[in-house]
Image (cartoon, rainbow, N blue to C red):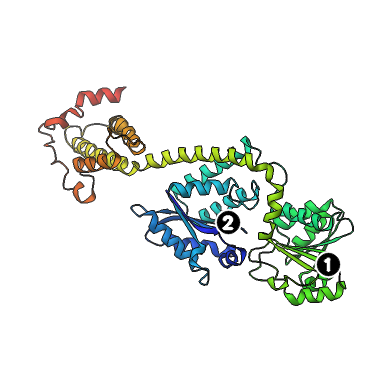
Amino acid sequence: MISVVGLSHKSAPIEVREQFALPAERIPALLTELVARPEVGEALLVSTCNRVELVAAARSGAALDAVARASRDALSALAPGAPPSALYALTGGGAVKHLFGVACSLDSLVLGEPQILGQVKEAYEVARRAGTVGAVLHRTLSRALHTAKLVRSRTAIGSGQVSVPSVAAELARRIFGDLAGSSVLLVGSGDMAETVARLLQSSGARLIVIGRTKEKVDALARTVGGEGRAWDTLGATLGDVDIVITSTSAPGHVIELDHVKQAQKKRRGKSQFLIDLAVPRDVSPKVQGRDGVFLYNIDDLSQVVADSLKTRGREALLAQEIIDAEVQSFDRWADAEQATPLIVALRERIRAALAAELGRSLKGRLRHLGAAERDALETMLDASVNRLLHVPSTRLRESATLADLETPGLAELTAALEHLFALTEDEAEASLPPPSAAGPSGPPRGESAELASAPDVAKLGAR
């Protein structure tokens, strides 16, 4: 199972969340350092404008609470000044349910927005390239993404064009009504800026795009019929526009109070609205409260979101039912997987014992057999192990998922099998039976004589 440690728009305001924002290029190092700890086996980071969450799986034998503490330490190091209560921690089934809800956009600022699914996929890919994803997170993320697709196909929670960029565009329309003749500055040329620009393209507003990468700025400006400008013109351009929408990935403010003061002089009393979609924030909060300047950050969009999504409540309930069913199914799989190490150890123990006896026979009474017959014996040995352990393996997995007082539990069966078959490392070698008296003078004695006789092997090779 997994742990989830982090914070979101529901648990912390933007001034706290932005302290935990991590540049994309630093994420692999954070994950690598985390899985270097003895208790953490796998990790990935979901980092968006509304949440920063470490999803981690334990190393064999480690407790999930220890994994959660390690994740909390790793995140706390990013923001030493943040209050300890800013971070929440979930483990086991609660963590799985939360992660599924995040992937399905039930925990988003904008209920049902589609961007989070792509962001979760990207988090998985970053961790995979960093080498910090293993079997547990691969299975968990695959099931979370599968659940998100079910929710999209079976409910109308994602209907319409409701997302953080669309809410920003809607807010701009509420402020100015008809945007025809208004001027809008987009600061940043990434995916969010492009989405906002496309939504405003048909409004009749004049669009100006400013970003650090000239090629991307020019391409976006051409796409939406706007004007691209160089980054060093930002201060001067502020005085030319009615609405500013920012969405850069800068580590600090790109619009300071002095920029806005200069713009106000140029605008001669005309009101200006700034919508800051970035985390960390692009616009200094000192701007807030100046006459004629109205600043909205991503947390301020919540009321607009609430007004836009009243009709999605019923769909959210349907989505939650789907999530609950998928989490329950995943929990059953995870419980059954607890039996896997025992099954593997038991299989290896029996396979090794049979292989040892076969090896002695092939050096003795059966040494005359050719390659084909020897291969046939190896195949027979593997098939015998599979047949022998099929029912025990099935019942061990069932014992991990059943809460039946009349049925032995997995812990009880594990202890019994480890004792009976000496499955621990220290006992395994010492408990091997003594070699059978196999050799040219006669066949193996006892039960091992029944493993294979020369006539039977000859017939096996002839089939």
The extreme right residue here reads 181
> SS at mark 2?
loop
Q: Are marks 2 and 1 in contact (CB under 8 Å)?
A: no
- Residue 177 position by quadrant: bottom right
Instruction: State the image coordinates of residue 369 (x, y, percent, origin top left).
Output: 24, 31
343, 236: nearer the viewer? 236
Chain-order first, disc 2 or disc 1 = 2
Dot 1 lies on which element?
loop
> In the rendered image of this protein, does residue 287 appear above or below residue 410?
below
Q: Residue at x 63, y 39 (%)?
A: 314
Q: In the visual, does 68 lie left or right of 289?
A: left
Quadrant where the C terminus sits is top left
> Considering depth in this image, is 316 or 43 the residue closer to the camera?
316
Q: Which residue is mark 1?
A: 271
Please tell me how crowded label 2 is: few (under 14), some (14-19), or many (20+) other residues with Cα within 10 Å.
Answer: few
Look at label 1 and name its amino acid: Ser
Relative placement, left or right, of 134 versus 450 is right
- Residue 379 shows up from this direction: no
Q: Nearer the viewer, residue 256 or 31?
A: 256
Q: Is residue 431 above or below residue 26?
A: above
Residue at 19% in and 48% down: 427
Residue 10, labelled with which disc? 2
Q: Could you classify mark 1 by the number of other residues whose Cα lies within 10 Å: few (under 14), some (14-19), or many (20 or more)?
A: some
* Residue occupying the point 55% across, 52% down: 125
Task: Give how far across and how far down residue 197 sits, in percent.
Answer: 78, 55
Q: In this view of the protein, can residue 174 be seen by the observer?
A: yes
Per the model, the C-alpha gap separating discs 2 and 1 is 31 Å
Give x and y (percent) for residue 106. 59, 47
Q: Nearer the viewer, residue 232 or 15?
A: 15
Please provide percent x and percent y for residue 372: 31, 31
For badge 2, the amino acid type reads Lys
